[in-house]
Amino acid sequence: MNSKFYFLTLFLPLFSISQTLKGKVIDKVTQQPIETASVYFDNTTIGTTTNKNGEFSITYTDAVQSALVFSYLGYQMVLVSDYRTKNNLTIELVEVNVALDEVYVEYDDGLTRRQKLRLFRKEFLGTSNFGKSCKILNEEELILKYDKKNKALYASSKVPVKLKNKALQYEIAFNIIDFEVNFLYVDLKTNAFTVNTVAYSGTSFYKNLKGSKKKKTIEYRESAYKGSVQHFMRSLFNHNIRVEDYAIFYKRFRVEEWDYFKVETVKDSDFKKVTLSDKVAILYNNKFQSGLELEIDEFFVDVYGNFTPVIGIYFSGVMGSQRLGDTLPSDYGL
């Protein structure tokens, strides 16, 4: 199974000092302030909300590489990538046209809502122990559609999908932009579904729960990190794949990793350029095997494990099966 899952994350050059960004969120038509609008850096634990005057203040460091997200119920989400060049922002949110949302009304598509929810949970949260520890807190907001002809499941939501990861002690708000599962084989009589590809994108905000500092939680988070895509990408950047307990194989034979991966410093940038000469297998800790294949010539990675572009980089095996329930925020460990 090829899994294509990614978050909408925009990257910019790093700065070495902390900065505080202030601004205001208003309604584009009325020009009135919007109170309690969410303001956060995508895929991080760094966020805030606007006050009664629509004002906000948020501090970030060089560990933050993602877009700044502005969202409020009933309004179109706004992402800002050039915030580093600004000291003050005024964000105008546009109200969603409710009439356009009528196209999402659910209908009889051959699957019950219970069946679609089961499939969605499996491919969105994952089937690992971490994924199984997750609970979606607002499933009633999910809009699920099944395309019988193309054997595909689609999901959307007018509000962020909220879930609690009990094992990793995060509450995650995920704004779905796209979600699609394509099935290779479907038998409705036996309720059998064989997944071909999974692809989803969106923005996410992580909130630490009360038990986040417990010893068991810290151990679980480290377990989720080791052998993850984030861990592997950081190892690529630091040129220490072998030190981090990864082994690279080509056609079932272990090979010298740097004969296949080429990591180059990019002038005037904190990103490094990565090229891969052929599809390889990745073994972590002599146990967990994944595959990596590129449909692009090159990609760029930074010290935090952020990489771009995300489309065209395909993991299979263990890394390919990781889902939202297995993920950590990009500022984890920093």
Image (cartoon, rainbow, N blue to C red):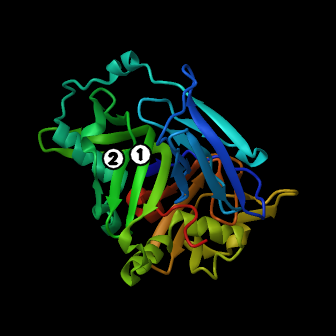
Image quadrant in which you'd find residue 326? bottom left
Question: Which residue is found at the position 44% from the left and 71% from the top?
Answer: 224
Residue farthest to the top? 99
Q: Amino acid at mark 2?
A: Val
Residue 53: x and y, percent?
Answer: 55, 38
Amino acid at the residue labelled 1: Val
Report the residue that reaches farthest toward the front: 52
Q: Nearer the viewer, residue 89 or 187?
A: 89
Say which quarter of the image contains residue 74.
Answer: top left
Residue 37: image location, x then y, percent: 49, 41
Residues at marks 2 and 1 touching, judged by CB atoms closer than 8 Å: yes
> Can residue 276 be seen?
no
Q: Is residue 282 above or below residue 196?
A: below
Mark 2 lies on residue = 195
Q: Is residue 222 visible?
A: yes
Name the residue: 56% across, 59% down: 292
Pick the front one: 298 or 209: 209
Q: Which mark is residue 198?
A: 1
Image coordinates of residue 121 in percent, x first then y, are 29, 50
Give the number of marks.
2
Q: CA distance from mark 2 to mark 1?
A: 8 Å
